[in-house]
Amino acid sequence: MNKKRSQENKDRQARLAAVQAQQRAGERKRNALIFGGIGAVILVIIIAVTLVIVQQVRVNNDREAAAAQPIEGVQTFDDVAFDHVDGPVDYEQSPPVGGDHSPIWTNCGIYTEEIPNENSVHSLEHGAVWITYQPDLDQAEIDALTDLVGSRSYVLLSPYDGLEAPIAASAWGLQLTVDSADDPRLPAFLDKYVQGEQTREPGAACTGGITPDGLVSS
């Protein structure tokens, strides 16, 4: 009787051990599936992030390469004055690309009304690019210029009365005139000259100055 009971206990223990082993195997399989799935998701995320970074690096490299090239049609003006003065200034260029100017700069941004030369020239000294357009320019062209400027810092956009060309882009000592907002030289001009090598006061602010009427975005 004791032998029979002992055998039954051994059989129960063997069955229990088999069940426990099967449960452990099932848990390992589930864990492998779970962690394998998580690992696959993490791998996909890593690949996606890597692709985004690579694409951004490629775009930045392309923009830097384009900015390093000369831009056809850019006029250069040497020996530009830079003193701070009070009152109006008679500039040689229209719009001006430098010269004596107000001690207070124009805050960078998108304007729907004309902004003062004397303050905006000071912004150019700080490394800003000033895009101006004829006041009667087609609204679609103005919208395209607005999209081009977007949220860029150190850019002024405004109408300019008496402008000979439809659109002009000015930096300190430099100017480009174009007929259309989709001219590829405009974004190249921005990439090359916003805070570019021509900047007389690198790091100086384009905020904290004056904000003329007509500001819609800064």
Image (spheres, rainbow, N blue to C red):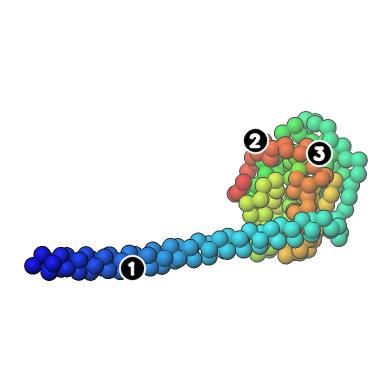
Mark 3 packing: few (<14 Cα in 10 Å), some, or many (20+)? some
Place residue 108 in its image quadrant: top right
- Residue 36 left/right relative to 200: left
Taking the spot 72% from the left edge, 36% from the top edge, the residue there is 204
Which numbered mark, 1 or 3, is in the foreground of this view?
A: 1
**Three-letter residue code for mark 3:** Arg
Quadrant housing the N terminus: bottom left
Q: Name the residue under label 2.
A: 208
Taking the spot 88% from the left edge, 40% from the top edge, the residue there is 80
**Three-letter residue code for mark 1:** Gly
Q: How many marks?
A: 3
Q: Toward the viewer: 195 or 17?
A: 17
Q: Name the spot of residue 137 as percent of width and height, x first.
A: 71, 60
- Residue 22, relative to residue 173: is it above or below? below
**Three-letter residue code for mark 2:** Gly
Taking the spot 42% from the left edge, 65% from the top edge, the residue there is 32
Among the two numbered marks 1 and 2 on one chain, the one whose residue lies closer to the N terminus: 1
Distance (Cα) linking label 1 and label 2: 67 Å
Q: Dot 1 lies on which element?
A: helix
- Residue 165 left/right relative to 43: right
- Residue 201, relative to residue 197: is it above or below? above
Q: Dot 3 lies on which element?
A: loop
Q: Which mark is residue 96?
A: none
Q: Name the spot of residue 199 as percent of width and height, x first.
A: 80, 42
- Residue 151 left/right relative to 1: right
The answer to whether residue 110 of the structure is visible from this angle is yes
Mark 2 packing: few (<14 Cα in 10 Å), some, or many (20+)? few
Q: Mark 3 points at which residue?
A: 200
Taking the spot 35% from the left edge, 67% from the top edge, the residue there is 25
Whether pointer 1 and pointer 2 mark residues with C-beta atoms closer than 8 Å, the reply is no
Among the two numbered marks 1 and 3 on one chain, the one whose residue lies closer to the N terminus: 1
Q: Name the residue under label 1.
A: 26
